[in-house]
Amino acid sequence: MEELSAIDVWLMVTAAMVLLMTPGLALFYGGMTRAKSALNMMMMSFISIAGVGVVWVLWGYSMSGATGVAQLFGNPFEYFGLSGAVGTADLISIGFGATFAIITTALVSGAIADRAKFSAWCVFVPVWVTLVYCPLAFMVWGGGLLSEDGLVGGAVGEAIDYAGGTVVHINAGVAALVLALIIGQRKGFGKDPSQRPHNVPFVMLGAALLWFGWFGFNGGAAEDPVEAGLIWVNTMVTPAAAVIGWLVVERIRDGRPTSLGAASGVVAGLVAITPACADVSPLGAILLGLVAGVLSAIAVGWKFKLGYDDSLDVVGVHLVAGVVGTLALGFLALDGGLFYGGGIGQLIAQIVAAVIAIAYSAILTLIIGLIIHATIGFRISESEEATGADLTQHAETAYEFSTLGGGGGGGSSTAGAPDNGPVPSRDGVNT
């Protein structure tokens, strides 16, 4: 029997780290919602693990890595049920790939917090990962349209996307924006004080777990110690710089830095370094983090100005920082970037890849979302929204609040949840 190599062991460890990111995301998102929707938000992450995990084994992996169909997706039947991979070490890398599909799908849920039907989300998860994530992963990483030998990649050059700037973050951010527009605003959007995050310590714990798992997210595919070391340092320093950038914006704009801003800055920096982790210097990574932190901090206020209700800032963080990290490679890539004498070719390749990812995710997500919304409905009723998604969707509550003066005889209603003050709009206007 063949023994496990050090690379195999490392890939298994990093796959477990990346899988842990989704429960970390559940804490991050759960803390940002209202108290009476926290469990529902966390369940949306957990059902992403369940739904995507099964799809990946049945046909998802095959669609992202098998023989191509028109350079758009792999043959879903070539490795159906992974029957062709059983008995080989390929299962390790297949499992690693599954964790990326899981976290990408879960990210989308943050845009529709507090108002989405859980049943509709359960339908959306397997359909979206099949029709959107897997084909885009194939186009970028599986030898498809955007790869070196693909129709587009061969014409304009292959875009650099080491760990998922286009496939994961731009993809999820665009899908989040589309669903937010389809479902519409929460009642009292921008005015209801209860819509502020109910548990910021959860948010910070979730951000910490995401940061830990991201070392596996970026570093799992490292091919040698030199590359692994660069990835590790860049994954450490970019979010650190992004926190500084984000907090400076808050201090100038709002008069005070916040813990929510620090946690969000961590994620923005992690998103930005994802495509670039193996291809920029540590100094370039610091610059990238500062830019991503500043631009994402500014972007999260756009939803109030433009009127789209992206509940947990998936667009402002993942789409914006994903685009920043993807395009920055045209300037900062050690091999081919403009700042290193590489000319404009790499920048063009990065722009083309970002545009195609945006267009593909937007069109397919729009079709999927509209069909679900027109059939089973994607949104809970106003009365259910007022009661809270935890009770109406799951018959559970995250917290038990004692009745006033009851001395411990509390019921299960979350109506007594504390009002923590004005909603922080992140653009300097408390509502």
Image (spheres, rainbow, N blue to C red):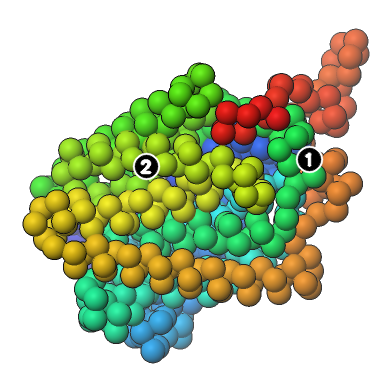
Secondary structure of the residue carrying numbered label 1? loop
Q: Decide: is 161 above or below 68.
A: above
Q: Quadrant of the N terminus?
A: bottom left
**Residue 197: % across, % down:** 64, 31
Residue depicted at x 81% and y 23%: 401
Q: Amino acid at mark 1?
A: Gly
Mark 1 highlights which residue?
A: 188
| 414 sits to left or right of 27 | right
Q: Residues within 10 Å of mark 2 (few under 14, many from 20)?
A: many
Secondary structure of the residue carrying numbered label 2? helix
Residue depicted at x 57% and y 57%: 176
Residue 42: tell me if it is visible: no
Between 264 and 35, which is closer to the camera in this rendering?
264
Q: Decide: is 70 above or below 322.
A: below
Task: Give residue 292's mark.
Answer: 2
Residue depicted at x 40% and y 37%: 294
Between 413 and 240, which is closer to the camera in this rendering?
240
